[in-house]
Image: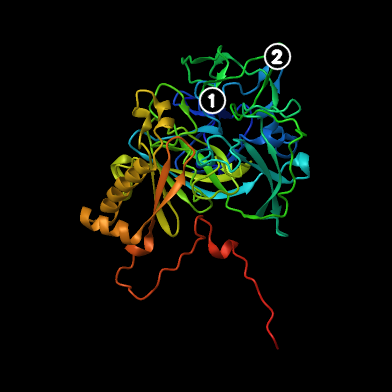
Amino acid sequence: MDEWGLVEGGHDIDIADMQANSSTVHWGYYYAGATPNLVINSGDTVNVEMCTQHGGDDYDKIVKGDPGIESIYNWTSSGPTVGWRGATGKGDGVHVLTGPIYVCGAEPGDVIQVDILDLEPRPNPGNDNRTYGSNAAASWGYHFRAGFLDGMKREIVTIYELIQAANGKSYVAVPDYQFKYGSFGLPQAPASYIGPVSNCTDFAGPLPELAQNLVYNFNNSGQTFRSMIQVPCMADNTQQWEGLYYPGVITQHPTGTEDYSIRGKFKVPINFHVGSMGLAQATNVTIDSVVPMMGGGNVDDRRMGIGATMYYPVAVEGGLISMGDAHTAQGDSEFDGTAIETNINGRFKITVHKKASLEPMLQNLDFPLLENANEYVVHGYTLKDYLTLPDPSQIYKMSSLDMAFTTAYNSTRDFAMRTFNLTEDQAITAVTTVMDFGVTQVVDGNWGVHVVIPKWAFTNLNDTTTPYAPVTISGTSTLLNATMPIIQTATAG
Protein backbone atom coordinates (compact mmCIF):
# COMPACT_ATOMS: atom_id res chain seq x y z
CA MET A 1 0.00 0.00 0.00
CA ASP A 2 1.14 3.58 -0.58
CA GLU A 3 0.39 6.88 1.15
CA TRP A 4 -2.92 7.13 -0.73
CA GLY A 5 -4.09 3.75 0.54
CA LEU A 6 -3.96 2.34 -2.99
CA VAL A 7 -2.12 -0.65 -4.38
CA GLU A 8 1.08 0.18 -6.19
CA GLY A 9 1.82 -1.44 -9.52
CA GLY A 10 5.44 -2.23 -8.55
CA HIS A 11 8.04 -4.02 -10.62
CA ASP A 12 7.12 -7.43 -9.21
CA ILE A 13 4.01 -7.50 -11.41
CA ASP A 14 4.13 -7.28 -15.18
CA ILE A 15 0.98 -5.30 -15.90
CA ALA A 16 -1.31 -3.02 -13.92
CA ASP A 17 -4.92 -2.68 -15.04
CA MET A 18 -6.92 0.52 -15.16
CA GLN A 19 -10.50 -0.35 -15.98
CA ALA A 20 -13.03 2.21 -17.16
CA ASN A 21 -16.11 2.48 -14.98
CA SER A 22 -17.95 5.12 -13.00
CA SER A 23 -15.43 4.93 -10.12
CA THR A 24 -12.25 5.23 -12.22
CA VAL A 25 -13.07 8.08 -14.62
CA HIS A 26 -13.50 11.82 -14.36
CA TRP A 27 -15.58 13.59 -16.98
CA GLY A 28 -14.43 16.78 -18.65
CA TYR A 29 -11.51 18.01 -16.52
CA TYR A 30 -7.96 17.57 -15.29
CA TYR A 31 -7.35 18.35 -11.62
CA ALA A 32 -4.32 18.27 -9.38
CA GLY A 33 -6.53 17.66 -6.34
CA ALA A 34 -8.01 14.39 -7.61
CA THR A 35 -7.26 11.20 -5.71
CA PRO A 36 -5.29 8.82 -7.95
CA ASN A 37 -7.06 5.64 -8.98
CA LEU A 38 -3.80 3.77 -9.55
CA VAL A 39 -0.27 4.14 -8.19
CA ILE A 40 2.63 2.75 -10.23
CA ASN A 41 6.42 2.84 -10.29
CA SER A 42 8.52 4.29 -13.08
CA GLY A 43 8.88 1.74 -15.85
CA ASP A 44 5.59 -0.05 -15.15
CA THR A 45 3.23 -1.06 -17.93
CA VAL A 46 -0.47 -0.28 -17.58
CA ASN A 47 -3.54 -1.50 -19.45
CA VAL A 48 -5.98 1.41 -19.65
CA GLU A 49 -9.57 1.23 -20.83
CA MET A 50 -10.82 4.42 -22.50
CA CYS A 51 -14.49 5.33 -22.92
CA THR A 52 -15.74 7.74 -25.56
CA GLN A 53 -17.84 10.73 -24.53
CA HIS A 54 -20.02 10.15 -27.62
CA GLY A 55 -21.51 6.80 -26.64
CA GLY A 56 -24.92 8.43 -26.19
CA ASP A 57 -25.09 9.16 -29.91
CA ASP A 58 -26.08 5.51 -30.37
CA TYR A 59 -26.35 3.92 -26.94
CA ASP A 60 -27.41 0.51 -28.26
CA LYS A 61 -24.41 0.17 -30.55
CA ILE A 62 -21.69 1.80 -28.40
CA VAL A 63 -22.69 1.37 -24.75
CA LYS A 64 -25.47 -1.13 -24.08
CA GLY A 65 -24.24 -4.53 -22.88
CA ASP A 66 -20.81 -3.32 -21.70
CA PRO A 67 -21.11 -3.11 -17.89
CA GLY A 68 -18.18 -0.73 -17.33
CA ILE A 69 -19.29 1.70 -20.01
CA GLU A 70 -22.93 1.41 -18.92
CA SER A 71 -21.96 2.46 -15.39
CA ILE A 72 -20.35 5.63 -16.75
CA TYR A 73 -23.45 6.55 -18.76
CA ASN A 74 -25.96 5.52 -16.08
CA TRP A 75 -28.43 8.38 -15.59
CA THR A 76 -31.59 7.89 -13.54
CA SER A 77 -34.30 10.27 -12.43
CA SER A 78 -32.17 11.14 -9.41
CA GLY A 79 -29.30 12.25 -11.67
CA PRO A 80 -26.29 10.86 -13.53
CA THR A 81 -23.86 8.50 -11.78
CA VAL A 82 -20.95 10.61 -13.02
CA GLY A 83 -22.52 13.97 -12.32
CA TRP A 84 -19.71 16.51 -12.47
CA ARG A 85 -19.09 16.92 -16.21
CA GLY A 86 -16.80 19.73 -17.26
CA ALA A 87 -14.42 22.00 -15.38
CA THR A 88 -17.27 23.69 -13.51
CA GLY A 89 -19.89 20.96 -13.95
CA LYS A 90 -21.56 22.81 -16.84
CA GLY A 91 -20.23 20.78 -19.75
CA ASP A 92 -17.23 23.10 -20.13
CA GLY A 93 -15.04 20.07 -20.80
CA VAL A 94 -16.39 16.90 -22.36
CA HIS A 95 -13.95 14.00 -22.34
CA VAL A 96 -14.27 10.84 -20.25
CA LEU A 97 -10.75 10.44 -18.81
CA THR A 98 -9.52 7.29 -17.08
CA GLY A 99 -7.27 8.01 -14.12
CA PRO A 100 -5.50 9.77 -12.69
CA ILE A 101 -2.44 7.55 -12.37
CA TYR A 102 0.17 8.53 -9.78
CA VAL A 103 3.75 7.71 -10.84
CA CYS A 104 6.02 7.25 -7.85
CA GLY A 105 9.09 9.47 -7.91
CA ALA A 106 7.71 12.01 -10.40
CA GLU A 107 8.31 15.57 -9.22
CA PRO A 108 7.91 19.03 -10.77
CA GLY A 109 10.69 19.61 -13.27
CA ASP A 110 10.88 15.93 -14.24
CA VAL A 111 9.59 14.50 -17.52
CA ILE A 112 7.17 11.60 -17.84
CA GLN A 113 7.57 9.35 -20.89
CA VAL A 114 4.56 7.39 -22.13
CA ASP A 115 5.17 4.64 -24.70
CA ILE A 116 2.00 3.66 -26.56
CA LEU A 117 2.45 -0.09 -26.89
CA ASP A 118 -0.96 -1.14 -28.16
CA LEU A 119 -4.43 0.20 -28.94
CA GLU A 120 -7.36 -2.09 -29.68
CA PRO A 121 -11.04 -1.29 -30.29
CA ARG A 122 -13.29 -2.36 -27.44
CA PRO A 123 -15.86 -4.84 -28.75
CA ASN A 124 -19.35 -4.43 -27.32
CA PRO A 125 -20.54 -7.77 -25.90
CA GLY A 126 -24.11 -6.50 -26.03
CA ASN A 127 -23.85 -5.94 -29.79
CA ASP A 128 -22.34 -9.20 -31.07
CA ASN A 129 -18.87 -7.94 -30.10
CA ARG A 130 -18.98 -5.35 -32.86
CA THR A 131 -17.41 -1.92 -32.42
CA TYR A 132 -18.96 1.38 -33.47
CA GLY A 133 -17.82 4.97 -33.21
CA SER A 134 -19.31 8.41 -33.66
CA ASN A 135 -18.25 11.54 -35.53
CA ALA A 136 -20.13 14.67 -34.52
CA ALA A 137 -19.98 17.55 -36.98
CA ALA A 138 -20.56 20.00 -34.17
CA SER A 139 -20.96 23.74 -33.73
CA TRP A 140 -17.32 24.12 -32.65
CA GLY A 141 -16.17 22.59 -35.95
CA TYR A 142 -14.48 24.86 -38.46
CA HIS A 143 -17.26 24.26 -41.00
CA PHE A 144 -19.48 26.49 -38.83
CA ARG A 145 -17.02 29.31 -39.57
CA ALA A 146 -16.78 28.41 -43.27
CA GLY A 147 -20.57 28.22 -43.67
CA PHE A 148 -23.13 25.86 -45.21
CA LEU A 149 -24.24 25.89 -48.84
CA ASP A 150 -27.89 26.34 -47.84
CA GLY A 151 -27.07 28.72 -44.99
CA MET A 152 -28.73 26.41 -42.44
CA LYS A 153 -26.50 25.63 -39.46
CA ARG A 154 -26.88 22.07 -38.21
CA GLU A 155 -25.08 19.49 -36.11
CA ILE A 156 -24.91 16.11 -37.84
CA VAL A 157 -23.72 12.87 -36.23
CA THR A 158 -22.30 10.04 -38.34
CA ILE A 159 -22.13 6.54 -36.84
CA TYR A 160 -19.31 4.33 -38.14
CA GLU A 161 -18.75 0.60 -37.83
CA LEU A 162 -15.27 -0.88 -37.55
CA ILE A 163 -14.86 -3.83 -39.92
CA GLN A 164 -12.45 -6.61 -38.99
CA ALA A 165 -10.18 -8.69 -41.17
CA ALA A 166 -10.08 -12.48 -40.90
CA ASN A 167 -7.26 -12.24 -38.34
CA GLY A 168 -9.51 -10.25 -36.00
CA LYS A 169 -7.71 -6.95 -36.53
CA SER A 170 -9.80 -3.94 -37.46
CA TYR A 171 -8.59 -2.36 -40.68
CA VAL A 172 -11.32 -0.08 -41.99
CA ALA A 173 -14.25 1.99 -40.72
CA VAL A 174 -17.38 2.42 -42.81
CA PRO A 175 -20.18 4.97 -42.32
CA ASP A 176 -23.43 3.35 -41.19
CA TYR A 177 -25.86 6.27 -41.00
CA GLN A 178 -26.23 9.95 -40.11
CA PHE A 179 -28.76 11.83 -38.02
CA LYS A 180 -29.45 15.39 -37.01
CA TYR A 181 -28.50 15.93 -33.36
CA GLY A 182 -31.13 18.59 -32.65
CA SER A 183 -32.76 21.74 -33.93
CA PHE A 184 -29.82 23.86 -32.77
CA GLY A 185 -32.22 26.55 -31.63
CA LEU A 186 -33.38 27.32 -35.16
CA PRO A 187 -37.03 27.66 -36.20
CA GLN A 188 -38.46 24.24 -37.00
CA ALA A 189 -41.75 22.95 -38.37
CA PRO A 190 -44.05 21.63 -35.60
CA ALA A 191 -43.27 17.99 -36.43
CA SER A 192 -39.51 18.47 -36.63
CA TYR A 193 -37.10 16.82 -34.23
CA ILE A 194 -36.03 19.18 -31.43
CA GLY A 195 -33.33 17.09 -29.80
CA PRO A 196 -32.70 14.32 -27.26
CA VAL A 197 -34.34 14.34 -23.85
CA SER A 198 -32.56 13.43 -20.61
CA ASN A 199 -33.34 13.33 -16.96
CA CYS A 200 -32.25 16.60 -15.38
CA THR A 201 -28.57 17.12 -14.78
CA ASP A 202 -27.08 17.75 -11.37
CA PHE A 203 -27.22 21.49 -10.73
CA ALA A 204 -24.95 21.49 -7.66
CA GLY A 205 -22.66 19.13 -5.84
CA PRO A 206 -19.16 18.23 -4.70
CA LEU A 207 -16.34 17.07 -6.94
CA PRO A 208 -15.97 13.31 -6.36
CA GLU A 209 -12.78 11.50 -5.32
CA LEU A 210 -10.95 14.49 -3.93
CA ALA A 211 -7.62 14.15 -2.20
CA GLN A 212 -7.80 14.14 1.58
CA ASN A 213 -8.94 17.39 3.27
CA LEU A 214 -9.97 19.02 -0.02
CA VAL A 215 -13.46 20.42 -0.61
CA TYR A 216 -14.57 21.54 -4.07
CA ASN A 217 -18.18 22.29 -5.07
CA PHE A 218 -20.00 23.42 -8.18
CA ASN A 219 -23.27 25.30 -8.55
CA ASN A 220 -25.24 25.47 -11.78
CA SER A 221 -28.50 26.73 -10.36
CA GLY A 222 -28.85 28.91 -13.46
CA GLN A 223 -29.02 25.74 -15.57
CA THR A 224 -26.62 27.16 -18.13
CA PHE A 225 -24.28 25.01 -20.16
CA ARG A 226 -21.62 25.38 -22.84
CA SER A 227 -21.44 28.98 -24.12
CA MET A 228 -23.91 29.97 -21.36
CA ILE A 229 -26.84 28.33 -23.14
CA GLN A 230 -29.77 27.81 -20.79
CA VAL A 231 -31.45 24.40 -20.80
CA PRO A 232 -34.09 24.48 -18.05
CA CYS A 233 -35.25 21.50 -16.04
CA MET A 234 -38.93 21.03 -16.88
CA ALA A 235 -41.75 20.02 -14.57
CA ASP A 236 -41.39 16.34 -15.46
CA ASN A 237 -37.69 16.41 -14.36
CA THR A 238 -36.35 16.33 -17.93
CA GLN A 239 -34.25 18.57 -20.13
CA GLN A 240 -34.35 18.78 -23.92
CA TRP A 241 -31.10 19.41 -25.76
CA GLU A 242 -31.30 21.33 -29.03
CA GLY A 243 -27.55 21.05 -29.55
CA LEU A 244 -24.38 19.40 -28.27
CA TYR A 245 -24.31 21.48 -25.10
CA TYR A 246 -23.57 18.79 -22.49
CA PRO A 247 -21.66 15.49 -22.79
CA GLY A 248 -23.16 12.06 -22.29
CA VAL A 249 -26.75 12.85 -23.28
CA ILE A 250 -28.37 9.74 -24.76
CA THR A 251 -30.21 10.18 -28.05
CA GLN A 252 -33.45 8.23 -28.33
CA HIS A 253 -33.58 6.51 -31.71
CA PRO A 254 -35.35 6.68 -34.05
CA THR A 255 -35.31 10.46 -34.16
CA GLY A 256 -36.98 10.70 -37.55
CA THR A 257 -33.81 12.27 -38.96
CA GLU A 258 -31.81 9.09 -39.63
CA ASP A 259 -30.31 8.97 -43.12
CA TYR A 260 -28.70 5.74 -44.37
CA SER A 261 -27.76 7.03 -47.83
CA ILE A 262 -24.14 7.45 -46.75
CA ARG A 263 -23.64 3.68 -46.72
CA GLY A 264 -21.19 2.52 -49.37
CA LYS A 265 -20.01 6.05 -50.23
CA PHE A 266 -16.45 5.79 -48.80
CA LYS A 267 -14.27 3.93 -46.29
CA VAL A 268 -11.85 5.21 -43.68
CA PRO A 269 -8.41 3.68 -42.95
CA ILE A 270 -7.89 2.75 -39.32
CA ASN A 271 -5.49 4.89 -37.30
CA PHE A 272 -6.13 4.24 -33.62
CA HIS A 273 -4.74 7.04 -31.46
CA VAL A 274 -5.29 8.78 -28.14
CA GLY A 275 -6.89 12.22 -28.45
CA SER A 276 -6.43 13.35 -24.86
CA MET A 277 -3.60 12.25 -22.60
CA GLY A 278 -1.86 14.52 -20.14
CA LEU A 279 -0.76 15.47 -16.67
CA ALA A 280 -2.48 17.54 -14.01
CA GLN A 281 -1.25 21.13 -13.81
CA ALA A 282 -0.19 23.15 -10.77
CA THR A 283 -3.49 24.97 -10.28
CA ASN A 284 -6.02 24.81 -7.47
CA VAL A 285 -8.98 24.60 -9.85
CA THR A 286 -10.24 22.05 -12.35
CA ILE A 287 -9.05 22.47 -15.95
CA ASP A 288 -11.32 22.19 -19.00
CA SER A 289 -10.43 18.93 -20.78
CA VAL A 290 -11.05 20.43 -24.23
CA VAL A 291 -8.12 22.86 -24.28
CA PRO A 292 -4.58 21.48 -24.84
CA MET A 293 -1.92 22.65 -22.41
CA MET A 294 1.78 22.45 -21.63
CA GLY A 295 1.25 19.10 -19.94
CA GLY A 296 -0.60 17.64 -22.91
CA GLY A 297 -4.29 16.96 -22.54
CA ASN A 298 -6.44 17.26 -25.66
CA VAL A 299 -3.60 17.44 -28.19
CA ASP A 300 -5.64 15.58 -30.84
CA ASP A 301 -2.62 14.61 -32.92
CA ARG A 302 -3.40 11.57 -35.07
CA ARG A 303 0.26 10.51 -34.68
CA MET A 304 -0.32 9.53 -31.04
CA GLY A 305 -0.80 5.89 -32.05
CA ILE A 306 0.90 2.55 -31.57
CA GLY A 307 4.67 2.98 -31.54
CA ALA A 308 4.58 6.63 -30.53
CA THR A 309 6.28 7.92 -27.39
CA MET A 310 5.02 11.04 -25.64
CA TYR A 311 7.06 13.20 -23.27
CA TYR A 312 5.32 15.53 -20.80
CA PRO A 313 6.78 18.06 -18.34
CA VAL A 314 5.74 17.22 -14.79
CA ALA A 315 3.96 20.00 -12.87
CA VAL A 316 2.73 18.20 -9.72
CA GLU A 317 3.96 15.35 -7.55
CA GLY A 318 3.19 11.99 -9.13
CA GLY A 319 2.34 13.60 -12.48
CA LEU A 320 -1.31 12.45 -12.20
CA ILE A 321 -1.71 11.24 -15.76
CA SER A 322 -5.15 10.62 -17.29
CA MET A 323 -6.16 9.54 -20.76
CA GLY A 324 -9.24 9.16 -22.95
CA ASP A 325 -10.92 10.62 -26.05
CA ALA A 326 -9.61 7.68 -28.08
CA HIS A 327 -10.05 7.82 -31.84
CA THR A 328 -10.37 5.29 -34.64
CA ALA A 329 -9.39 7.82 -37.29
CA GLN A 330 -8.92 11.56 -37.77
CA GLY A 331 -7.35 13.81 -40.35
CA ASP A 332 -5.09 16.71 -39.45
CA SER A 333 -7.23 19.65 -38.19
CA GLU A 334 -10.08 17.47 -36.79
CA PHE A 335 -12.06 19.77 -39.04
CA ASP A 336 -15.70 19.17 -38.12
CA GLY A 337 -15.12 19.07 -34.36
CA THR A 338 -14.48 15.42 -33.54
CA ALA A 339 -12.80 12.29 -34.88
CA ILE A 340 -14.39 8.83 -35.04
CA GLU A 341 -14.81 8.70 -31.27
CA THR A 342 -14.51 5.12 -30.06
CA ASN A 343 -14.14 2.99 -26.93
CA ILE A 344 -10.54 1.72 -27.08
CA ASN A 345 -8.32 -0.30 -24.75
CA GLY A 346 -4.64 0.63 -24.63
CA ARG A 347 -1.37 -0.56 -23.19
CA PHE A 348 1.20 2.00 -22.05
CA LYS A 349 4.64 1.96 -20.47
CA ILE A 350 5.20 4.94 -18.18
CA THR A 351 8.68 6.11 -17.19
CA VAL A 352 10.00 9.05 -15.15
CA HIS A 353 13.08 10.99 -16.27
CA LYS A 354 14.57 12.99 -13.41
CA LYS A 355 15.31 16.67 -13.92
CA ALA A 356 18.98 16.34 -12.92
CA SER A 357 19.76 13.80 -15.66
CA LEU A 358 17.58 14.90 -18.60
CA GLU A 359 19.10 14.49 -22.05
CA PRO A 360 19.29 17.70 -24.11
CA MET A 361 16.05 17.12 -26.06
CA LEU A 362 14.08 16.91 -22.78
CA GLN A 363 15.70 19.82 -21.00
CA ASN A 364 13.43 22.82 -20.42
CA LEU A 365 10.57 20.90 -22.05
CA ASP A 366 7.44 23.05 -21.98
CA PHE A 367 5.20 21.32 -24.54
CA PRO A 368 4.09 17.73 -25.25
CA LEU A 369 6.78 16.13 -27.43
CA LEU A 370 6.09 13.13 -29.65
CA GLU A 371 8.70 10.70 -30.93
CA ASN A 372 8.37 7.68 -33.19
CA ALA A 373 10.68 5.61 -35.39
CA ASN A 374 10.77 8.28 -38.10
CA GLU A 375 10.53 11.61 -36.41
CA TYR A 376 10.04 14.01 -33.57
CA VAL A 377 6.86 16.08 -33.50
CA VAL A 378 6.75 19.43 -31.69
CA HIS A 379 3.33 20.77 -30.65
CA GLY A 380 2.47 24.45 -30.48
CA TYR A 381 -0.77 26.24 -29.65
CA THR A 382 -2.29 29.70 -29.85
CA LEU A 383 -0.89 30.15 -26.34
CA LYS A 384 1.75 27.79 -24.95
CA ASP A 385 0.33 28.15 -21.44
CA TYR A 386 -3.19 29.54 -21.66
CA LEU A 387 -3.67 28.88 -17.94
CA THR A 388 -1.72 32.10 -17.25
CA LEU A 389 -4.65 34.13 -18.60
CA PRO A 390 -6.67 35.96 -15.90
CA ASP A 391 -9.68 34.05 -17.23
CA PRO A 392 -8.46 30.89 -19.04
CA SER A 393 -11.87 30.39 -20.69
CA GLN A 394 -11.10 33.42 -22.87
CA ILE A 395 -8.79 31.24 -24.95
CA TYR A 396 -11.84 30.22 -26.97
CA LYS A 397 -12.13 33.80 -28.22
CA MET A 398 -8.40 34.06 -29.00
CA SER A 399 -8.01 31.03 -31.30
CA SER A 400 -5.42 31.89 -33.93
CA LEU A 401 -3.35 29.85 -36.36
CA ASP A 402 -0.97 32.80 -36.72
CA MET A 403 -0.20 32.67 -33.00
CA ALA A 404 -0.05 28.86 -32.99
CA PHE A 405 2.38 28.92 -35.91
CA THR A 406 4.64 31.32 -34.01
CA THR A 407 4.50 29.23 -30.84
CA ALA A 408 5.27 26.05 -32.80
CA TYR A 409 8.20 27.71 -34.56
CA ASN A 410 9.70 29.08 -31.35
CA SER A 411 9.49 25.69 -29.64
CA THR A 412 10.91 23.91 -32.70
CA ARG A 413 13.81 26.33 -33.02
CA ASP A 414 14.72 25.89 -29.36
CA PHE A 415 14.32 22.11 -29.56
CA ALA A 416 16.54 21.88 -32.65
CA MET A 417 19.23 24.09 -31.12
CA ARG A 418 19.58 22.02 -27.95
CA THR A 419 18.97 18.59 -29.50
CA PHE A 420 21.10 18.89 -32.63
CA ASN A 421 23.63 21.46 -31.38
CA LEU A 422 22.60 24.13 -33.88
CA THR A 423 22.93 27.88 -33.74
CA GLU A 424 19.79 29.95 -34.24
CA ASP A 425 20.68 30.71 -37.85
CA GLN A 426 21.44 27.04 -38.50
CA ALA A 427 18.13 26.08 -36.94
CA ILE A 428 16.20 28.54 -39.12
CA THR A 429 17.47 27.04 -42.37
CA ALA A 430 16.94 23.51 -41.05
CA VAL A 431 13.36 24.33 -40.08
CA THR A 432 12.75 25.64 -43.60
CA THR A 433 14.41 22.88 -45.62
CA VAL A 434 13.86 19.78 -43.46
CA MET A 435 10.74 20.15 -41.35
CA ASP A 436 7.01 20.24 -42.07
CA PHE A 437 4.46 22.44 -40.31
CA GLY A 438 0.90 21.13 -40.11
CA VAL A 439 -2.42 22.07 -38.52
CA THR A 440 -3.12 19.65 -35.67
CA GLN A 441 -6.58 20.91 -34.78
CA VAL A 442 -8.79 23.99 -35.18
CA VAL A 443 -11.53 22.95 -32.77
CA ASP A 444 -10.09 22.84 -29.24
CA GLY A 445 -10.02 26.52 -28.30
CA ASN A 446 -6.23 26.62 -28.12
CA TRP A 447 -5.65 25.82 -31.80
CA GLY A 448 -2.70 23.61 -32.60
CA VAL A 449 0.16 23.59 -35.11
CA HIS A 450 2.70 20.76 -35.11
CA VAL A 451 6.14 20.49 -36.67
CA VAL A 452 7.42 17.14 -37.96
CA ILE A 453 11.20 16.69 -37.70
CA PRO A 454 12.59 13.66 -39.61
CA LYS A 455 15.37 11.97 -37.64
CA TRP A 456 17.04 10.93 -40.89
CA ALA A 457 18.25 14.48 -41.47
CA PHE A 458 20.28 14.48 -38.24
CA THR A 459 21.67 10.92 -38.10
CA ASN A 460 24.41 9.09 -40.01
CA LEU A 461 25.60 12.40 -41.38
CA ASN A 462 28.51 10.81 -43.26
CA ASP A 463 26.05 8.76 -45.32
CA THR A 464 24.97 10.99 -48.17
CA THR A 465 23.90 8.25 -50.59
CA THR A 466 21.10 6.45 -48.75
CA PRO A 467 17.77 8.15 -49.46
CA TYR A 468 15.15 8.85 -46.82
CA ALA A 469 12.96 5.76 -46.40
CA PRO A 470 10.35 6.09 -43.64
CA VAL A 471 9.48 2.94 -41.72
CA THR A 472 6.10 4.07 -40.44
CA ILE A 473 2.90 5.09 -42.18
CA SER A 474 2.70 8.82 -42.77
CA GLY A 475 0.49 10.44 -40.17
CA THR A 476 0.68 7.50 -37.79
CA SER A 477 3.19 5.69 -35.63
CA THR A 478 2.40 2.27 -37.09
CA LEU A 479 5.11 0.19 -38.73
CA LEU A 480 4.62 -0.15 -42.46
CA ASN A 481 5.42 -3.83 -42.61
CA ALA A 482 3.05 -4.57 -39.74
CA THR A 483 -0.05 -3.12 -41.32
CA MET A 484 0.32 -2.61 -45.05
CA PRO A 485 -0.87 -5.73 -46.89
CA ILE A 486 1.18 -7.01 -49.80
CA ILE A 487 -1.14 -7.14 -52.76
CA GLN A 488 -0.16 -9.87 -55.21
CA THR A 489 -1.31 -9.53 -58.77
CA ALA A 490 -1.56 -12.29 -61.32
CA THR A 491 1.02 -12.28 -64.08
CA ALA A 492 0.59 -13.60 -67.58
CA GLY A 493 2.30 -16.94 -68.04
Figure quadrant of residue 105: top left
| Residue 421 in the image, given as x and y percentages of width and height | 24, 56
- Near-viewer residue (19 or 389): 389
Assess disc 2: are there few (<14), some (14-19) or many (≥20) residues with their C-alpha within 10 Å of its C-alpha.
Answer: some
Q: Earlier in the sequence, mark 1 or mark 2?
A: 1
Which residue reaches farthest front? 150
Figure quadrant of residue 202: top right
* Tag shown at residue 8: none
Q: Which residue is mark 1?
A: 226
The kind of residue on which mark 1 rests is Arg
| Residue 15 in the image, given as x and y percentages of width and height | 57, 43
Q: Is residue 153 visible?
A: yes
Q: Is residue 276 placed above or below 192 in the rendered structure? A: below
| Residue 284 in the image, given as x and y percentages of width and height | 40, 21
Figure quadrant of residue 62: top right
> Distance between the Cα atoms at labels 1 and 2?
20 Å
Q: How is the image coloured?
A: rainbow
The kind of residue on which mark 2 rests is Asn
Q: Find numbered disc 1 in the image and state the secondary structure of the residue it sits on.
A: helix
| Residue 478 in the image, given as x and y percentages of width and height | 53, 57
Direction from residue 125 to residue 450 in the image, left or right: left
- Near-viewer residue (150 or 197): 150
Q: Quadrant of the C terminus?
A: bottom right
Whether tag 1 and tag 2 are in contact, CB under 8 A, the answer is: no
Direction from residue 116 to residue 232 in the image, left or right: right
Q: Is residue 352 placed above or below 68 in the rendered structure? A: below
Q: Find numbered disc 2 in the image and state the secondary structure of the residue it sits on.
A: loop
Q: Is residue 217 placed above or below 429 in the rendered structure? A: above
- Near-viewer residue (181 or 188): 188
Q: Is residue 353 visible?
A: no
Q: Which residue is mark 2?
A: 237
